Amino acid sequence: MVADSVFFLWSHHSVETEPVTVFPDGCRDVLVIHPPGTRPFVTLTPFDFRPRPVALPRGTAITGYRLRPGSAVDQPVLDAIAANPAAAREILSHDLGAVDDVGTVIDALALPGASVGSAARSLGLSVRTLQRHLVGLHLPPPDYWRLLARARRAAAMLADHASLTDVADSAGFTDQAHLTREFVRWFGQTPGGLRRQPKVLDMLRQPALGNWTSEQISTR
């Protein structure tokens, strides 16, 4: 993986005090947060398993570097960015540029129709070895990647005019009720509710688990 495909750069500025919902996407973000009237600080977000509400005070500016699914950075990297936020892109590109097997493992689990068993076999591993590998890297278990990727693929289909039954079938759910349960689990809303919120659907289509691309820039 080359240095220009290891993170997705985005920015956000709160014009008014606002609640924001962070949805699970299989990624961790390095955030350079600049609250009004204070010095910026740097943090690394966790993996989300449920929608997470965040309150942003008016005037807060955020520059985010969404790391490729499964990736993280060590505290010395965060410290280096905190000391020189303007060099964050260079620091992250250097630190994350090396190829590793995390992306290969997660890609196998995120494939349409994948099971944990089929992903393990494609990697030449046993299911138990695959599970231990993720635990050793302090990553969520195999089903996290598989089920979240399926839900995110289905969410991307909602912008089309297909029926929810067709969306469920195309994305690999048992039926529409199964689709609805998984949407409530991951996104806190039904498919019909999300379909009425194009801005949220746009967020769910940004590069992350299941649709990672090379470096892009987004303004939320």
Image (spheres, grey):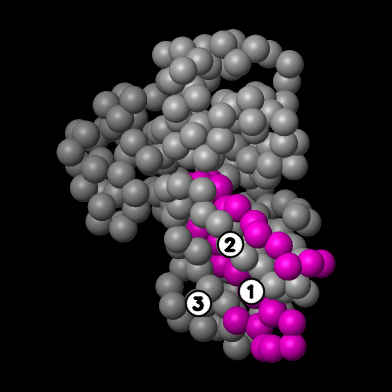
**What stretch of residues is rendered in magenta?**
15-41
Q: Split into 4 quadrants, where in the image is the C terminus? A: bottom right
Residue 55 visible, this orientation = yes
Which of the labelled discs sits on residue 213, or is there none?
none
Under mark 1, the amino acid is Val
* Amino acid on which disc 3 is placed: Val
Secondary structure beneath dot 3 equals helix
CA distance separating discs 3 and 1? 13 Å
- Dot 1 corresponds to which residue? 32
Residue 97: give x, y in percent of width and height.
Answer: 54, 61
Residue lying furthest right: 15
Residue 131 located within the stretch drawn in magenta = no
Q: Amino acid at mark 2?
A: Val
Decide which of 123, 178 is in the foreground and name it: 178
- Pinpoint residue 150: horizontal percent, then vertical percent: 48, 29
Q: Alpha-carbon distance for marks 1 and 2?
A: 15 Å
Q: Residues within 10 Å of mark 2 (few under 14, many from 20)?
A: few
Which residue is at 20% across, 34% downward?
Answer: 126
Q: At numbered mark 1, what does the secondary structure look like: helix, strand or loop?
A: strand
Q: Position of residue 181 (x, y in %)?
A: 44, 27
Q: Which residue is found at the position 62% from the left and 65% from the top?
A: 55
Q: Dot 2 lies on which element?
A: strand
* Residue at the image position 66 percent from the left and 68 percent from the top: 56
Mark 3 lies on residue? 77
Nearest-to-viewer mark from 3 and 1: 1
Q: Give the labeled residue for mark 2.
A: 54
Who comes first in sequence, dot 2 or dot 3?
A: 2
